[in-house]
Amino acid sequence: MDSPHGAAVSAENFGVRGPRGWVFRGVRFTAAPGSLLAVEGPSGSGRTSLLLALTGRMRSTDGHAETGGLRLPGKLAAVRRISALGPVPGVSELDPAFTVAEHLRERALLQRRFDGSLRTLLRPRAERAATARARVTAALDAAGLDLAALPKADRTSVRDLERLEALRLSVALALIARPRLLAVDDTDLKLSDAERADAWALLRTVADDGTTVLAVCSEAPEGALTVRADTTTEEGTADAIAETGRA
């Protein structure tokens, strides 16, 4: 598929402070379009909140960031339009009762309804449906999800998917929108070493195709631009320090 030009992402003393103190703070980094950016740290270090803030889903309270040239926290809605979420617990989870086909059909319908220009909406229904099918096929190919290899093909329920297959489905659903920034939470959670390598290979491929990828993990892979998050529980803070060089 024709990949969109990725969004450059940067932050300067970026932070979020909540009722109980800092969720994260002091984040500084610059990532070029098409980068693979790994947010590394233990659970509770503010990793997911940083992901949500950089994609316009959470309002920051300190410093600033830019995603695709859009300054945060001021341009939250605009950043949401150019970014897409893969799996994020409590925000964009797959429904275990849905089949793969149902998830794909629902996402394609939403894409056609809310993200098309007036000219696109006025095209014949059959033409719009064919375009949607092509976009779904391209997203599945980019995510490396082979429907024929699933236990019941596209009629397989999400609850019957392996963890890596579910990750691929979530990435495919996000890529249907052709985002400039793809954000994925808990990338390496409950994966074997081989599966973890496959997951990072998938995200590298997406980045190489032009989409900037922001991935939360417990351990960043070699070659990723890394932001490390460390929690200081005594002070109720989470300090993140970015490495602007590649590992």
Image (cartoon, grey):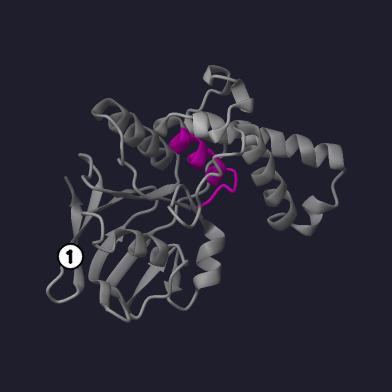
Is 84 in front, or is 94? 94
Determine whether 53 is above or below 226 in the image.
below
In percent of width and height, residue 23 lies at 28, 71
Q: Which residues are magenta?
A: 166-180
Disc 1 marks a residue whose amino acid type is: Thr
Name the residue at 31% across, 37% down.
190
Residue of label 1: 231
Residue situated in front as seen by the camera: 68 or 163: 163
Q: Main secondary structure of the magenta part?
A: helix
Label 1 secondary element = strand
Q: Is residue 175 left or right of residue 109?
A: left
From this view, report whether residue 129 is shown above or below residue 61: above
Q: Is residue 103 magenta?
A: no
Asked if residue 173 lies in the magenta stretch, the reply is yes
Q: Quadrant of residue 127?
A: top right
Expressed as whole percent of the image width and height from the top left, the position of residue 65 reads 36, 71
